[in-house]
């Protein structure tokens, strides 16, 4: 069996194109598993995984936990709120205390960019980055690419638009790296204030017109306005943002072609997407959620080969 070129999943930037294809191919097999009457396999029966989340999360945490249980792993959940972190314990001490309980793998979300990379150099356990600050969210990018492949087939030459708050998004960067390695063309679209200063230098097109971007693309991956990460005002109001950069079903229906609509969640309905667009036949948002479990099963299974 093929194996990944790395013992950690810290970011898409560290994966080869072959690694990505291996994960996506393995995810296809696990998607069949989770749609069977008996949804569990014994693949990780002797493996203990700790979900260490220093930031709030619903979808990602539940998705990882379900993936781990589908693989028959033993699961430990850690939340920073109510833990010794609040008493001043360091990140490394916290994780080492968890590892002392004979944990094999760490799934970690942290508000500081690079936190999983820091840990990977100091502990022996495999680490899966479940999101580090505004840096990367690799499993989200993998499940997005998997979902696109289900709808469009090979992504080489396909036109993918990433629309919204690129500046504060960890999903955007991981998606760009992943899609580029799969051969797709990428346009990012949003107000100037929500685009990173040097984003054009990594080989993406830049647009400030949602209508033109929708007409150009095969897939529109719409990102949430991350108000909790914004320390200053980047646009006058949510109403004005929605007016210029929001997407509704009428806009989709007026296109002269069918496109696929995606969103990593949670959706600010009425801001970046109207309800009629989010719930339309264009949308594969719930497919993304289902595929997230299969993709995370694939990642955990492939990394477990290197324990």
Image (cartoon, rainbow, N blue to C red):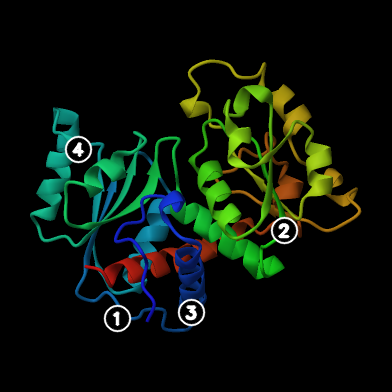
Check the picture and name the quadrant holding the N terminus. bottom left
**Residue at 18% across, 34% down:** 85
Q: Nearer the viewer, mark 1 or mark 3?
A: 3
Distance, label 3 to label 4, CA atoms, is 36 Å
Please tell me how crowded label 3 is: few (under 14), some (14-19), or many (20+) other residues with Cα within 10 Å: some
Does residue 201 appear left or right of residue 277 in this picture?
Answer: left
Residue at screen point 19% across, 74% down: 46
Neighbourhood count class around disc 1 (C-alpha, 10 Å): few under 14, some 14–19, many 20 upward: few
Q: Which residue is mark 4?
A: 91
Horizontal side of residue 251 vs 237, given as left or right: right
Write down the residue under mark 1.
Answer: 42
Mark 3 or 2, which is nearer the eye? 2
Question: In this rendering, is residue 226 above or below 24?
Answer: above
Q: Which of marks 3 and 1 precedes in the sequence? A: 3
Question: Residue 29 shows which numbered tag?
Answer: 3
Give above or below for 151 relative to 204: below
Determine contact: label 4, label 2, CB under 8 Å: no
CA gap, disc 4 and disc 2:
41 Å
Tell me the number on the disc at residue 200. none
Work out how far the residue at label 1 is from the one at label 2, CA to CA, in angstroms: 37 Å
């Amino acid at each position: 069996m093929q194996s990944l070129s790395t013992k950690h999943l810290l970011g898409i930037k560290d994966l080869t194109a072959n690694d990505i294809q291996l994960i996506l191919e393995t995810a296809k097999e696990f998607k069949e598993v989770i749609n069977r009457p008996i949804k569990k396999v014994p693949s990780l029966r002797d493996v203990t995984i700790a979900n260490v989340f220093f930031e709030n999360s619903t979808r990602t945490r539940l998705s990882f936990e379900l993936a781990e249980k589908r693989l028959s792993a033993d699961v430990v959940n850690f939340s920073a709120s109510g833990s010794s972190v609040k008493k001043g314990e360091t990140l490394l001490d916290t994780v080492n205390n968890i590892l002392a309980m004979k944990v094999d793998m760490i799934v970690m979300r942290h508000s500081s960019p690079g936190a999983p990379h820091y840990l990977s150099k100091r502990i022996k356990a495999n680490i899966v980055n479940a999101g580090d600050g505004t840096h990367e969210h690799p499993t989200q990018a993998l499940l997005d690419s998997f979902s696109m492949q289900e709808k469009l087939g090979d992504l080489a030459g396909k036109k993918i638009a990433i629309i919204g708050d690129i500046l504060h998004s960890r999903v955007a960067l991981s998606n760009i790296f992943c899609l580029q390695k799969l051969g797709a063309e990428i346009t990012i679209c949003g107000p100037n204030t929500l685009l990173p200063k040097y984003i054009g230098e990594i080989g993406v097109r830049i647009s400030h017109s949602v209508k033109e971007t929708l007409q150009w693309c095969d897939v529109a991956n719409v990102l949430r306005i991350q108000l909790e990460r914004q320390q200053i005002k980047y646009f006058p109001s949510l109403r004005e943002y929605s007016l210029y950069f929001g997407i509704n079903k009428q806009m989709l229906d007026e296109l002269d072609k069918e496109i696929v609509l995606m969103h990593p969640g949670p959706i600010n309905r009425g801001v970046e997407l109207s309800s009629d667009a989010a719930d339309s036949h264009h949308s594969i948002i719930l497919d993304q959620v289902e595929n997230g479990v299969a993709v995370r099963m694939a990642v955990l299974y492939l990394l477990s080969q290197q324990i």
